[in-house]
Amino acid sequence: MMSALTRVENCMADLTPDSNGALHEQRDWLLVTLSSIGDAVITTDLSGRLTFLNHVAESLTGCTQQVVGQPIDSVIHIINEESRQPVEIPTVEALREDRTVHLASHSLLIAKDGTERSISDSAAPITNAEGKVAGVVLVFRDITERRKTERALAKSLAYADDIIASLREPFIVLDFNLRVKTANRSFYDKFQVSKEQTENCLVYDLGNGQWDIPGLRKVLDEVLSRKQSVHDFEVEHTFADLGRKTMLLNARPFPPDSDHPELILLAVEDVSAVRERADELAEASRHKDEFLATLAHELRNPLSPIRNSVHYLGQEGLTEQDVKAARDIISRQVAIMVRLVDDLLDVSRISSNKLDVRKERVDLAAIVQSAVESSRPLLQQCGHELSINLPPEAVPLEADPVRLAQVFLNLLNNAAKYTERGGQISLSARREGSDVVVSVRDNGIGIPSGMLASVFEMFTQVDRSSYQSQGGLGIGLTLVRRLVEMHDGAIEARSDGANQGSEFIVRLPLVTRAIIETPSRDGAAVKGPGHGRILVVDDNKDSADSLARLLRSKGSDIRTANDGLEALEVAEAFHPEIVLLDIGLPKLNGYDVARRIRQQPWGQKVLLIALTGWGNDEDRRLSQAAGFNFHLVKPVDLAALEELLVGAK
């Protein structure tokens, strides 16, 4: 534009009045020159009247040579593209200021027919041979297509900026000198840097040199040298402020497939949490596989002596002592299987956060006594010596006596399992401020230092190559920790290492009052005739018949049924005083059987006892809603069942 204006100015300045012939020749030469210029050219005199316009000016304005002599502002109309307000014609300012004037950007020329064209123009005074201003020249060109391109480019850039800004993963745009042109908010937030600390900086200098990462250099060198994209290149790096990070780098040149790219687009995805989670899932899967293998092993262990004892009892000529020994073996092994099943139920409750505690005022000594009584057979079997040291005064707790006894039973059993025969085990308690601290210590195989942090995790077990004769699923300590936490307490494990023994320390809050209150018992057994008419309902015929035989031996009148409809038929004819009823029955389930019995006049006072393999909290709630008085889980504890039957007298 300036070159065209300069040429016009020079041409006009050459119009010297040497002679009329020379002047005409110069004017002719000027007209030819101005007509050949690709830009629009308009000249005016000092009063602002048009003296000349070339063909390009005619084409753009829609005017002809007939407008020569008219004021320029009556012919040329220019407005601002954005405000739509009139813009002063540059020739006016050029004459007024006696200088070259450039039209403001975003100007529109309104042609005679109303057509709008984006233009860029300049105006400059014309001086004569004496150096005086003789007029002004206006040179302009149609930049409509260029403006369209600029607007499209601006829109594309804004669109690209919006895309980059909306990306959830950190994103950087580098020039080919590896300086940051821009980055998105995710990058600033994720790596805790500001825009001012990032833009125009060499990428390797970011964060005081923390981004001088060998893996990043390798990726960018690949893009620079081969001008090809790099996908999901994994890099691990420790940042001074952020710690260890695992990142996936994706880089590509822009424009793509260009021999001379101008930019490098770099996406930095932080996958640290994903990698950690993947490691955790892999570890959990490994623990699960170990757990299933252990479960199969532990279930086979008691099944073998049970099967052997059953075959043994089938032999002839057995003495009463022989039968008792076989029966004792079966009883012990069934107890082990019951414990394994209970552990499995506790796994489910832990996973679904449905462990239930029923707190009441209790004394620690009673809890410890219950745990020791349950653990004593195992301690004696292993030949261990147990010492107990409790405070002489009462230690009042707000606790579930059954669940808290389970905590100390687990700790004592673990100590017994992982201590060589004839070991020393101690259980002691002391007050510390508003807490009581209970310690279970042994001189057994100890815990490796690397396992102390994970010993309370599900399915974790210390090396079981030697001390595994007592079995276990590796969930005991997980259950212990959860139960302690549900009592607002805490537990920690200590050990000096292999063969140095272990200590588990439980801290529990004391209650504010030292008075131990004995709560009233709800749901007492329904009064009834006791061992009278009993209906046993189970779809497993062996289960129903064996229980019926046992109860019949104690003097009860027994009937059996093996499905829900049969149970109702027998009950209608038999009018039982007690019904031992399975839940998962064919034809009609136990819940519906219980409801129909309760609808009968004779069924209002029947003692209904659910005897089922379903034992979670929801099952108990459903059985209560169906009208059951009690809910026992298979295999039934015969002593507990006997207690219920005796209590019904």
Image (cartoon, rainbow, N blue to C red):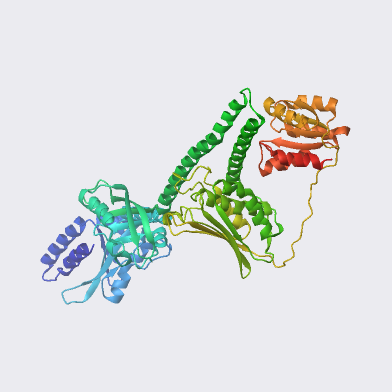
x, y (%) of residue 561? Answer: 75, 25
Which quarter of the rendered picture does the N terminus lie within? bottom left
Q: Where residue 319 sits: x, y (%)? A: 65, 28
Where on the picture, by quarter, is residue 630? top right
Q: Is residue 558 above or below residue 6?
A: above
Side of 32 where 198 appears, left or right: right
Residue 297 is left or right of residue 433, and the answer is: left
Residue 114 visible to an observer of this rendering: no
Q: Up-down: is 129 above or below 176? A: below
Residue sitting nearer the eye, 27 or 389: 389
Q: Residue at point 17% right, 69% down?
A: 13
Total numbered circles = 0
Q: Residue at x 40, y 50 (%)?
A: 275
For image coordinates 83% across by 37% down, the residue present is 530
Residue 421 in picture, x, y percent from top left: 50, 49
Given residues 373 and 17, the one toward you in this image is 373
Residue 623 found in image quarter = top right
Residue 298 visible in the displayed image? yes
Of the pair 546 and 60, the residue shown nearer to us: 546
Q: Is residue 180 left or right of residue 346?
A: left
x, y percent for residue 640: 72, 42
Q: In which quarter of the image is the C terminus?
A: top right
Residue located farthest toward the top when viewing the structure as drawn:
316
